[in-house]
Image (cartoon, helix red, strand yellow):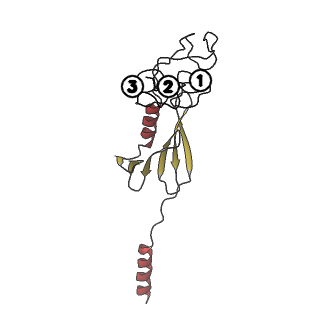
Amino acid sequence: MLRLLLIVICVLLTATPSAAPACPPKLEEIRDAQNRLVGTLRTQGDCAMEARDRASRLLGRYDPRSRQTRDAQGRLVSTGNTLPALIWAAGVKTDVRPVMSKCRYCNSTSYGSCLRSPHKKHEHIEDEKRCEFCGSSSYGSCLNSPTKKHRHGSGSNKCRWCGSTSTGSGCLNSPNRNHEK
């Protein structure tokens, strides 16, 4: 009888699933040398980790049980925790701006009011990817523009007012309703 009881106890102990490791939830900020936020590392209760960029977009996950890092689409990146490398790589891609453009009237790198400009606003002409009046990469309303619409520099075969590759009439942002390149 005692032998049967010991066997039952051994079977129950071996059949009991081991408890999953528990980690205290934690959020770590990754910052660059100028103390700007590059991304975050979040540790969850099951010790899994996820990396997010400064805009809180998911970059990848690390599972300590399988020791695998996977990107946001679930593709295997590496064996081991390489989440900080994903954060730094994402930060480098979004921060590339090699040369600051300058106002055509006063050579200032700032945006807003300009004492030398005929319309009293700084006007940057070198960058076709950004608004000449405020530096934004979007199209539509602009507080600094004399026409109150973003106008990008010329180049890249796109309309300066809306970013379209169309030609002729039909631009909703242009003052004369024509696409300008």
Give the total of numbered labels. Answer: 3
Circle 1 sits on which residue?
A: 147
**Cα–Cα gap, marks 3 and 2:** 14 Å
Q: Residue at x 42, y 38 (%)?
A: 85
Earlier residue among tags 2 and 1:
2
Quadrant of the rendered image containing residue 122: top right
Is mark 3 in CB contact (under 8 Å) with mark 2? no
Hey, what amino acid is under mark 2? Answer: Arg
Q: Nearer the viewer, residue 7 or 88?
A: 88
Circle 2 sits on which residue?
A: 130
Q: Is residue 98 above or below residue 23?
A: above
Q: Is residue 72 above or below residue 151?
A: below
Earlier residue among tags 3 and 2:
2
Percent across and percent down for residue 59 are 45, 44
Q: Residue at x 43, y 50 (%)?
A: 62
Hey, what amino acid is under mark 3? Answer: Asn
Q: Residues within 10 Å of mark 1 (few under 14, many from 20)?
A: few
Q: Quadrant of the N terminus?
A: bottom left
**Cα–Cα gap, marks 2 and 1:** 16 Å
Circle 3 sits on which residue?
A: 157
Badge 2 element = loop
Q: Residue at x 41, y 56 (%)?
A: 65
Q: Nearer the viewer, residue 8 or 56?
A: 56
Q: Residues within 10 Å of mark 3 (few under 14, many from 20)?
A: some
